[in-house]
Amino acid sequence: MLRLASILYSLIGTTLAGSLVVVALTMGYDTLNPILMAAGAGFVAALPVTWLVAKAIQNA
């Protein structure tokens, strides 16, 4: 399951980080710190999401 989770994390992490960066830019935060914080939050939030998706795929 770790192999599946690592493949999924590469997709889910970039998607969530990119989405949160777009949200930050839309809200008017256009300096470096808010953009990096949004990207970091996306990568951290992707960990439990990846685990749940990998578990659901494995059980299917």
Image (spheres, rainbow, N blue to C red):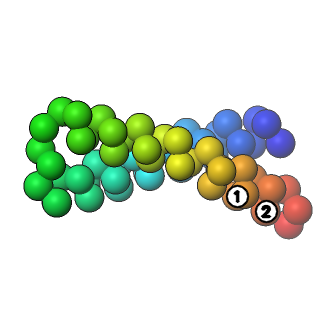
Q: Is residue 43 left or right of residue 9?
A: left
Which residue is the site of mark 2?
56
Q: Position of residue 3 (x, y in %)?
A: 76, 35
Identify whether 60 is placed above or below 28: below
Q: Amino acid at mark 2?
A: Ala
Quadrant where the C terminus sits is: bottom right
- Could you say which is closer to the camera, residue 24 or residue 9? 24
At 15% from the left and 49% from the top, the residue drawn is: 29
Q: Quadrant of residue 28?
A: bottom left
Residue 1 appears left or right of 7: right
Q: Residue furthest right?
A: 59
**Looking at the image, which residue is at 65% across and 40% down?**
7
Give the residue pinned by disc 1. Answer: 53
Query: From the image, which quarter does the N terminus lie in?
Result: top right
Q: Are marks 2 and 1 in contact (CB under 8 Å)?
A: yes
Horizontal side, residue 54 vs residue 44: left or right: right
Q: Residue 9 at what x, y percent from top left?
A: 60, 42
Q: Position of residue 41 (x, y in %)?
A: 43, 44
Evaluate whether residue 11 shows in this view.
no
What residue is rendered at 72% in x and 50% in y? 51
* Number of marks present in the image shown: 2
Q: Residue at x 44, y 52 (%)?
A: 16
